[in-house]
Every structure is written in C-alpha cells, then in structure tokens.
Image (cartoon, coloured by chain):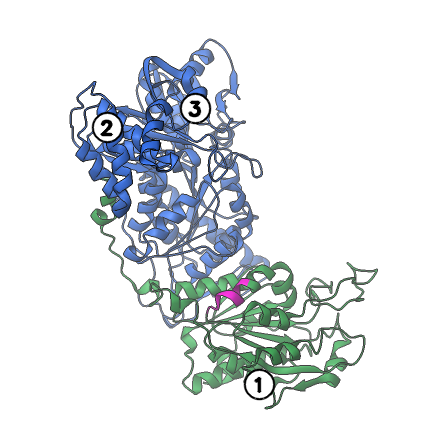
Chain colours: A green, B blue
C-alpha cells in the first residue's frame, strides 16, 4: 500500500500552506506503514471527524468514515467501537470541537479507555468561522468575538488528558511531519484511549504561533520516562499554551500505560454485531410474563 | 415490599388465577416515603384502566387512609395499621413488612391458598423470602375468608416498559444506550438486567448527547441500536437526530413523555410532546413516529420501529408516556409481530459501493465498515459516495432521494394498521397512545360512539383518518395535554378541524368515569372542557 492509495477525488480546500496538510500526510504515511507492517487492516479502519477545518480530513482520506457533528467525535468513535469492537477507530477533532463543545465527552473518553485514537488539531482558534477564541486560546488574544481581549487562561489539553486517565498521551507538531507520523503509529497501536495533541498553527487567524513553536518546540528524548506519571505531568506543565514569553514546548510521547480497555470488560463485545444472525426465542423472552 | 412491588405481587397472583388486572402507579419524585400508591382494577372481564373509586384500601400508613377514604365505595374495606402494626411489632421487622401482612389479609378474604402466596414470594424474593412469607402468613391467619375465588385460565401480566423491552429483543436489538430519566429509566433497568442472557449490550453514557451520537456510531458499524429518554433528554438529542436523518442511519428513539414544559412533573404522565416528536431536529428529513396504546402494542410497535428503521435507513421515534410505561396490563396471551429481525445489510457489497446510492425508492442498500468497500456517513450534504458537496444540483438530488422513501413507507405502514377503530356508533372519539385504555373501558357505557386510535403519527395516515372523521356526526378529541396537538396535526394533514376536545393536563391519566362525564358534558354543548 502507498500513501496515494488513501487519496480521494475531493479537491482540498485548506488554505495553501496550512499545517493541516502536515497532519494529513503524516496520517496517510502512518496508516500505510502500519498496513505494510501487518499491524493494521485498512478495510477494518474507520475514521471519525468533527466540524471545523480539521473535519475536512474526512473527505481527504479514502477510508471508512463518519463526519459527524461539531463536538461529538468521541461519542461516535466510542459507538463505532461498541458496534464493531474489531475496528480500528481513529478520531480527528478540532480544539474548539473537542474542548469547547465536546469537553464532557473528552473527559469521559479518558475514563472509559475504549481502544480508540483521538487526534486533536490544536490551532487555538475557531478558524472556519473566521478566527474566534476557543478553550485553548491564550489569554489576551483579540478577535471578532473578543475585541477586548480573551480574558481567561486556556485549558492545558495535555494535562487534562493525563489527569482524566488517558492511557496514551502525546503531543505532535504538524510542521514536524516525520516525528508526528511516528507518534501516530504508536498511538494507533496502543491498546486503549490514545490522545495526540497536534499543534497546528493557523496561518491566517493565529499566525504568531508559527515562529513561536518553530523556535521553542523540542522533542522529548530517551531521558523522559513515559511510564512515569509525575514526569509526564511535569512535562505537560512546561508550556501552558501561552505566548507571553519564550517557553520550551515539549513534543513527543508524554505517557503510556496499560489499563484494561472498555471493550475487554464486556463479554458481549466479542464480535461485530452485524455478523450475528439473531433468532430471538419468543418463548424464552416472554416466559416471565406468563 | 414497597407499594410498587406489593401491587405487582397482588396483580401477578390475580392474573395467574385468570383475572384481568390493570395496575396504575402514582408516586412523587423522591426516593423514600412521600405519598406513593397504586390502584389495581381486578375483573373477570378485560380491563385496560383504573378507577378512582375503591372496594379495598390496603394502607401502609395513616396518610393513605386519610387521602383515599373519601373514595371508598359503600361497604368497602380498609386494611391498615390497626391490623398490621401488632404483627410488625411481633416480628420486630421493618415497618415495610406491613405490606406483606396486607397481602395475607387480602388473599385470605378471597380464599386463595396460602401456599400460592408462598410460591409467589419465593419466585419474587428467592432466598430472602423467609421474612416476607412469615409476615404474609401472619396477615393470612388474622384475616377471614369471605369469597372463594375461582381459578380461571392464567393470563399474561406486563407493563408498557416490559412490552417495549421484549419488543426490542424480539426485533434483534444489539445495543441500548440511555442516560437515566424518568419515566424511560425502567426500560434501561429491564434491558440491563437481561443483557447477558440475550447477548445485548446496555450502557449508560455520560449524557443524552453522547447516547445518541454513540448510537449513530454503532448504527454506522452495523449494530441495531436503540436509545431511551424522556422529553428533556430528547431535546438534547435533537441535533444528532437530524444527523440520523442526514446520514440515513437506522435508529430507534424511545421517548417516554412526562409532565412538561422543562423538568415539569418528573413522575407523572402527559402527551405534550407529540408535535415535538414529529418536528424534532433542524432541517427537513423523513422520520417515523409511532405511539403504542398498551403493553401488547408496545411489543409489536417496537418491533415495527426496528424493522422500518433498518429497512428504510431512517430514524424512528417510539413515543410512550409515564402512564403506558409504568402501568401493568393483562392479556390472554402476548403476541409478537410477524416482522423478522432482519438487519438489511448487504452480505457482499460491490467494490464500487455507494453509501448513498440513488435508487428507485430512495433507500440505499446498507453496507458496514469491515466488509471491504469504503462506507461513509456524512452530516454535510454529500454525493452518493458520502463525500461532502456544496453544489446546487447534487443538493437537490440528495434531498429528493431522502424524501423518495416516504411514498414507499406510507404503503408499508398501511399494512401495519396505522389506525384502529373500536366499537360501533355514528360519533367518534379520536386519540393516540396511552389514553386507549380508559377510552376502551368507557366505550361500552357510551351510546353511539366509536373510537379512532391513531398509532402512526408520522408519516400520518391522513386518508384513513379523514375517512373515519367524515363518516362521523360528532367528533371529540381526547388527549393528555393542554392544547390537543393531535387535532392540529389532523387539521394540517387532512384539512378537517376537530373543535371538541377533552383535555387533561394535571399529570394524571384519564379514567373511564371521568371520560364518560366529560363526554356527556361535551354532548350537552360544552365546546371544550379542561381539568386541573
């Protein structure tokens, strides 16, 4: 399989130069490599996307796909897994999508530890609706809806994922595609809920993050112990999604542990439901009423 | 045993003895205590409703006597604290044992053998039945036999909720998702308890929005899925309900109405969500709304809901209410619909599969991820492959495709008795859903009245309804609501206006006596009468 095999006929409408292309290419390469390594079956993979610039990835990846509602990527991923536990389910969300509209689902997805991968395109704005602040936008940001400046401090999404119990937590940078690809491969093969916070600076409505991240992003190296929760929290707190002063921005895998997946705890979730030929036994199901 | 368990216990014994029982449950929204009561109507002829006059009052506390004594018939009997307290003290058990003493007293009165009561107690409580049996026995010994109840052919005793549950299992449901909300929660409990033996999955996600979106994810991957809630929860689900319409994913929504607007009367009944159900969701898309009238119909209508949802790839609302969900009904036997548990999923989808293929009847044959070809579901307007589009021509084509289903659906629904007519006469009562019971029980006492029950509210069986109305002299709408929404729907769909309405919006269901009184008042010239 080649990355071109995952191309669709759709015209790409992201802005020229948008870091989303980096995410798309990394995703294609990660999926193709996993398929070629025998670790993934493309026909048994489904992607779920939300609404926002990120959501267009549904139209650009030639895979089974569900383009749902704004904020609801995670419940659809979860449901897809309930419907067919044999599928590999990959969710793509925006940061507004995931941490404004859908934040309750995120918290619970970390808890459930269903075997799904969630990649969030963190551009710190609602870009498709012309650049309003979202839950990850830094304090002081000025836009059409916050002309007086964003007053609140952003959610640290990596920290939230760790605190809520995600069993794989990583951060990637869309402009460092080969590194991002490796993270994606690890996330998809991880058993349980995998979260990737993908820094995807919006080159129209959040331009200042490109030079900042290019200067400050650094890769976590071997000295970082991914099994150490305390270290992961420390790394997550290094950068609070702020641009006030230069602060190092760690990227890479912060944390990975094993915990029983949601699916493994339900005896009913052994095979895809659609393969079960049901013949309900009327006498059995009505006996108690006679 | 509390009031609910005690009344079910009593009802079950009477139905096993071949009698018809209707068990109405009335309780406030609190956990323990409050004034919590059931009304049982027991007869050797079919009954579908309760009355507000009693032959017996079985009272756990003095409040029950104080509240209900005025409604005791002449010669009626009260069993209460006077009888139960000494026994409870003697047994040194909890106060609630009094209900078992009452059971003993009641069945002694009817000459039912004590062993029958013991067997029933063991069936209900298993190993924990000892104290229950002892207290029943004490009551039994205290009582005296006044009648010798004849044993007839055993009957089936079933609530609306249980009907919905076995209908879902019989229809081949795989997954039920629900966030707790009265009066839909009993179905969550019923199915959860039976999930392993029936190999179904029952899960309570973080909220209603998660429930419906997860249900659509599961439907996309090939599971037959149902969600359950009441009006407030369904309000939260409506964005995704519209997604079900756009993505053409089969989904059954069980919505059990309660007093509203807003949080309303959490544990009381209403039919105020009819227009909400037929209009829920933004944009225009076909859906099915059906309203079962009793527990038997709950079974067959739920089967129909799954069948039609899968066959037509369309969302279906099964509109119930507290009165139907939490009342127990008796039938000689319970029957299933002949419709099977088909999945309507292609066995071998073609390589160039189109998720939204335009077909003669608008229904694209379904495939699911994992079969091979690429399967898509899209909330944006899309082409036949499910890829996003914005152009005008495709938009029209796809909207037309989705609505093409309606004509075929209507034909199919016409075979499923979308309306039922009961009784003979030139006047007509028109209603839907749980009012059926009180109306059926009132009908023999009303001269010259038929009853038209509308079971499919969308697509609306306009021709059949218009035909019945046109051949009637006087037409009266009966609805557990403040405005009589069905009259508006009938006017919209048939052009016929029903001016006479008997409405009840106090959170309590109709009873036959009240209906007869209201209908007679109505005949004397009152245009519209309401109750509080």
In the rendered image, residue A188, in percent from the top left (x then y), is placed at 49, 78
Disc 3 marks which residue? B62
In the rendered image, residue B149, in percent from the top left (x then y), is placed at 18, 23
Distance in Å between CA atoms under marks 3 and 2: 21 Å
Disc 2 marks which residue? B140
In the rendered image, residue A81, in percent from the top left (x then y), is placed at 43, 66
Please identify the dominant SS of the magenta region. Answer: helix
Near mark 1 (Cα within 10 A), the count class, few <14, some 14-19 or many ≥20, is some
Q: Could you tell me which chain the residue with mark 3 belongs to?
A: B
In the rendered image, residue B388, in percent from the top left (x then y), is placed at 55, 64
The mark that comes first in sequence, 3 or 2, is 3
Query: Is label 2 in a helix, a strand or a loop?
Result: helix
**Residue B451 appears anywhere in the view:** no
Q: Which mark is residue A225?
A: 1
Asked if disc 3 and disc 2 are in contact, CB closer than 8 Å, the reply is no
Q: Tell me what residue is drawn at x 42 percent, y 14 percent.
A: B517
Distance in Å between CA atoms under marks 3 and 1: 68 Å
Q: Is residue A111 magenta?
A: yes
Q: For the view shown, which residue lies furthest in the bottom direction?
A: A222
Considering only vertical position in the picture, is B15 above or below A105? above
B164 and B474: which one is in front?
A: B164
Q: Is residue B202 magenta?
A: no
Quarter of the image with the C terminus of chain A is: top left
Asked if disc 2 and disc 1 are in contact, CB closer than 8 Å, the reply is no
Asked if disc 3 and disc 1 are in contact, CB closer than 8 Å, the reply is no
Query: Is label 3 in a helix, a strand or a loop?
Result: helix
Query: Is label 1 in a helix, a strand or a loop?
Result: loop
Q: Which residues are magenta?
A: A108-114
Q: Tell me what residue is drawn at x 64 percent, y 85 percent.
A: A176
């Amino acid at each position: 399989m080649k990355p071109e095999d995952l191309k669709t006929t759709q015209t790409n409408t992201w802005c020229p130069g948008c870091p989303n292309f980096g995410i798309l290419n990394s995703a294609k390469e990660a999926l193709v490599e996993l398929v070629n390594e025998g670790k993934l079956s493309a026909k048994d993979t489904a992607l779920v996307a939300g609404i926002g610039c990120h959501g267009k990835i549904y139209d650009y990846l030639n895979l089974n796909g569900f383009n749902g509602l704004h904020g609801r990527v995670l419940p659809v991923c979860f449901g897809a897994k309930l419907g067919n536990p044999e599928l590999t389910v990959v969710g793509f969300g925006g940061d507004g999508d995931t941490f404004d509209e859908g934040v309750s689902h995120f918290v619970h997805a970390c808890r459930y530890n269903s075997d799904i991968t969630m990649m969030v395109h963190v551009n710190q704005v609602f870009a498709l609706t012309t650049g309003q602040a979202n839950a990850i936008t830094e304090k002081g940001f000025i836009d059409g809806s916050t002309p007086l400046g964003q007053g609140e401090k952003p959610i640290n999404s990596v920290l939230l994922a760790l605190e809520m119990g995600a069993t794989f937590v990583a951060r990637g940078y869309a402009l460092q595609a080969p590194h991002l690809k490796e993270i994606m491969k690890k996330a998809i093969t991880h058993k349980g809920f995998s979260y990737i916070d993908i820094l995807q600076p919006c080159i129209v409505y959040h331009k200042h993050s490109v030079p900042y991240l290019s200067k400050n992003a650094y890769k976590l190296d071997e000295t970082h112990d991914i099994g150490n929760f305390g270290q992961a929290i420390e790394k997550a707190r290094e950068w609070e999604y702020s641009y006030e002063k230069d602060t190092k921005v760690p990227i890479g895998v912060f944390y990975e542990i094993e915990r029983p997946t949601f699916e493994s705890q339900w005896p009913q979730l052994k095979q895809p439901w659609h393969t079960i030929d049901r013949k309900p036994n009327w006498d059995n199901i009505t006996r108690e009423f006679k | 045993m509390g009031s609910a368990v005690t009344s079910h216990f009593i009802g079950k014994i009477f139905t096993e003895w071949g009698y018809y029982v209707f068990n109405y449950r009335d309780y406030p929204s609190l956990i323990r205590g409050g004034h919590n009561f059931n009304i049982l109507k027991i007869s050797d002829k079919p009954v579908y409703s309760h009355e507000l006059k009693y032959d017996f009052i079985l009272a756990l506390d003095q409040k029950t006597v104080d509240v209900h004594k005025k409604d005791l018939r002449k010669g009626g009997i009260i069993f209460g604290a006077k009888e139960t307290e000494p026994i409870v003290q003697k047994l040194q058990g909890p106060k609630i044992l009094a209900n078992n003493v009452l059971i003993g007293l009641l069945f002694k009165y009817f000459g039912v053998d004590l062993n029958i009561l013991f067997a029933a107690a063991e069936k209900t409580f298993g190993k924990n039945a000892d104290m229950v049996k002892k207290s029943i026995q004490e009551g039994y010994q205290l009582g005296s036999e006044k009648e010798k109840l004849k044993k007839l052919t055993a009957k089936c005793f079933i609530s609306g909720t249980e009907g919905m549950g076995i209908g879902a299992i019989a229809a081949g449901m795989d997954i039920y998702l629900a966030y707790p909300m009265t009066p839909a929660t009993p179905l969550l409990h019923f199915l959860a308890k039976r999930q392993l033996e029936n190999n179904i999955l029952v899960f309570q996600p973080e909220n209603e929005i998660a429930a419906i979106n997860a249900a659509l994810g599961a439907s996309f991957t090939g599971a037959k899925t149902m969600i359950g809630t009441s009006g407030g929860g369904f309000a939260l689900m409506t964005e995704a309900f519209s997604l079900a319409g756009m993505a053409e994913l089969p989904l059954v929504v069980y919505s059990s109405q309660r007093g509203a607007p807003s949080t309303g009367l959490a544990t009381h009944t209403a039919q105020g969500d009819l227009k909400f159900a037929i209009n829920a969701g933004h944009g225009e898309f076909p859906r099915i709304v059906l309203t079962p009238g009793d527990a038997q119909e709950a079974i067959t209508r739920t089967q129909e809901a799954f069948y039609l949802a899968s066959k037509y790839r369309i969302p279906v609302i099964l509109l119930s209410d507290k009165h139907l969900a939490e009342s127990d009904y008796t039938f000689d036997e319970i029957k299933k619909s002949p419709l099977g548990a088909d999945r309507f999923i292609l066995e071998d989808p073609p390589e160039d599969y189109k998720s939204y293929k335009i077909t003669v009847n608008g229904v694209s044959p379904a495939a699911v991820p994992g079969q091979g070809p690429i399967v898509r579901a899209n909330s944006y307007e899309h082409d036949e492959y499910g890829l996003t589009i914005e152009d005008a021509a495709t938009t029209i084509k796809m909207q037309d495709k989705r609505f093409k289903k309606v004509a075929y659906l209507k034909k199919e629904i016409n075979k499923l008795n979308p309306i039922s007519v009961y009784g003979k006469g030139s006047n007509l009562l028109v209603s839907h859903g749980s009012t059926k019971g009180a109306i059926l029980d009132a009908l023999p006492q009303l001269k010259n009245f038929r009853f038209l029950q509308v079971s499919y509210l969308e697509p609306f069986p306009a021709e059949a309804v218009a035909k019945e109305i046109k051949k009637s002299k006087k037409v009266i709408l009966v609805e557990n609501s403040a405005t009589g929404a069905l009259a508006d729907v009938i006017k919209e769909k048939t052009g016929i206006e029903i001016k006479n309405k008997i409405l009840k919006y106090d959170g309590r269901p109709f009873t036959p006596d009240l209906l007869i009184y209201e209908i007679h008042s109505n005949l004397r010239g009152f245009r519209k009468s309401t109750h509080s």
